[in-house]
Amino acid sequence: MNEGNGFYMYVSTRACYDPAKTIFVFAPGEEAGEMASAERFAVRSGWQALAEYDGAVLILPLAPMGWKREVVSLPGRIYELIRGGIESRNGKSLFGRGGKIWCWETMIYLVGYGDGAVFAGNCLVAEPGRFAAAALIGGAPEDYSAGKKRSGHWMVPEIGSDYGVRNDQIPCSLWLIGAQKEETRRALDYFGVSGGLGREPKQVSMGMCTAVCYENEANPAQRLMVSEGTEVSGMPLAHAILDAYFDRTVRWKTGSDGTLALHLGRTEFYQSNRFIHGSVTVGCLEYAYSVHLPEGCSAEDVRGLPLLFSVHGRGEPAWLFAEKNGWDVLADETRAFVLVCPDSPGNIWQLERDGLAFEAMITRICGDYGLDRTRVYLTGFSNGGAITREVGTTWPELFAAIAPFNAPVNAPGLVAAEVVNPGFLSSGYELPYWVCVGDRDPAAGTDVDGQLEVMLAANRWAGGSEERTAVRCGGRSEEKAVPCGGSSEERAAVCCGGSSEEKAVHCGGSSEERAAVCCGGRSEKDRAVHNEGCFEESSAVCCEGCPEEGSAVCCEIHSEENRAVRSEGQSKEGHTIRREAHSKECPTFPTRFLPNEIRTVDNYYTTSQGYLQGDRFKTLVYHGPDGLPRVAFTIMKNMPHGAIPEQSRAAWEFLRHFRRPAGSRQVEYLTD
């Protein structure tokens, strides 16, 4: 890239709260040599007027020496330069973005004309995971050599060492308009393989244009459309590309290179009958919401079904978010719940302002459709996950269970100061909890111990599995190598499951007589061999070596009869710390709380259960006193600040088992 070339940029005066599309237009070489000619082309082609109407950011890169002299990283480098620094022209912007427009990573588009189309096509081959869709007029890719290179995985820069995807393995969405037959054949050979496209095309209408479409049967967003020629040009052609194509195609941030998807788009979302729109007024604010009934169900058919909230994140309005996590498709498949997607004022949720809106929506929607108020489930993503956590623990009586996805915990001004409501634990309410994070998510992180400590206590967790001898110490130093259910040192001998010293009899439901040995309800003589033993007498604690930071400490507790001791040290309290050779690698967990069970692709997330990406899941499950799941913590492999529909499936399999009888602080577990 010649850094001195520059680019012409037009920012819509309508861009403010909603995410903005970034549309790259590569003009023919003779019109891309200088700023004035690029601006004239932006106007004449219709793209500037369309960008203004759409609230988008339009970029026309310059190529004074011609497109053949430019490098294919050009659009990516320009995007990285401008993505966080474009000032709003109307003085309005999303809260927390400092007056800047949000050029969303999932909505970057390419358009090319003539030799600019050839260059844009080469950019698509070289960085396929960066673009949601491309439309090339009068040209097609010429250089496919970059397809053999490894993906730049720009959505997850620090990828796992086992990720070896090449560019030619990443599906694309491309519309060729007026390309030569040989160009079309080469494109079909290349993109047909990368996208798994069928060879039997269908005729499609794209606004004022028609095209033959080769698409992937399982995911029709992976497609190559071909229009051999068209009499449409200028504004009408640009309008067809934007309205019928770009508006309906996104590349969700689901992993290293994203996932293409079709969605309704803003206009169609409000005009189609897939969602029913309503609103409630709380104080002086109106809260819009969109209800989805399972496909084929009438209002009468859904009577008695539960209600499930899917709450959008910051800057992601309901029209864009509603189809993102796949809750609507899951509702169609299971016909087991009614979905509602609420909208917040200004595209951000804040507990103090918006908390009361949820009860108002529950009352209105359950009343309108005769839904079961004992089975209301609250889920949300990002800022929507934070409000899920905050509202759920402030008004637990409203919900049977909650599930926050990728929810930040340390974002001043964007989430509440406390991870969960400070008064929740003392309220005595149970609240089943399914929390999910991505292992490559800088926005939310992976530390959920603060949440787990409270939620495990509230749900009367009885401690880790008795059968499992390898337990995670959570990175504590040797003097804290015997945590009791992850509780603080002061409560170690009595809490097991979160009860206080004054309530030592709560641990695992043990009686008062067993208070001193409550961990899991073990008898005194058995306590030295119990996994969660927290007593000074339980000296057979074995800790594997770990980094000083303490992220992978693995401890074992052994009976007196079975100590294969390698080395010995003393903890602060005088416990004997035994380091032992293990016959196999100890399991390590991203938390100090030992789960009762672990769900992976091997035993739960199988293809037969509907999980095509089950290898990305690891779920730690914690049981209540009845031995049934009450809390679950899922961490997703190679996941940035995003989500896949299969996470919603996993969350639903957890949530659907709970109901809260009217007026009860306890929940009931519903078996299959």
Image (cartoon, rainbow, N blue to C red):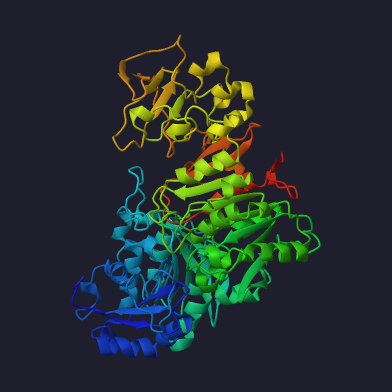
Q: Answer with left or right where residue 121 lies relative to residue 394.
A: left
Pick the quarter of the image with the N terminus: bottom left
Of all residues, the one furthest to the top in this rendering is: 561
Q: In this view, does 127 lie to the left or right of 372?
A: left
**How many badges with numbers are in the image?**
0
Q: In which quarter of the image is residue 387?
A: bottom right
Quadrant for the C terminus in the image: top right
Task: Provide residue 511's location: percent of width, then percent of height.
Answer: 64, 25
Q: Nearer the viewer, residue 450 or 62?
A: 450
Q: Going 46% across and 49% down the picture, which residue do you hit?
A: 437
Image spot of residue 665 (x, y percent): 68, 45
Whether residue 605 is visible here, answered yes or no, is: no
User: Is 253 situated above or below 540?
Assistant: below
Residue 349 place in picture, x, y as percent: 52, 65
**Residue 162 in view:** yes
Which residue is pictured at 53% across the width and 76% down the height? 244
Q: Which of 510 and 247 is in front in this view?
A: 510
Q: Relative to 365, is 345 on the left or the right?
A: left
Instruction: Give 592 or 178, whichever is nearer the viewer.
Output: 592
In the image, residue 363 above or below residue 666? below
| Residue 67 higher or lower than 352, as above or below | below
Q: Residue furthest right?
A: 300
Measuring 38% from the left and 20% from the top, which residue is drawn there? 575
Residue 234: which quarter of the image? bottom left
Task: Give residue 134's position: percent from left, percent from top.
Answer: 41, 71
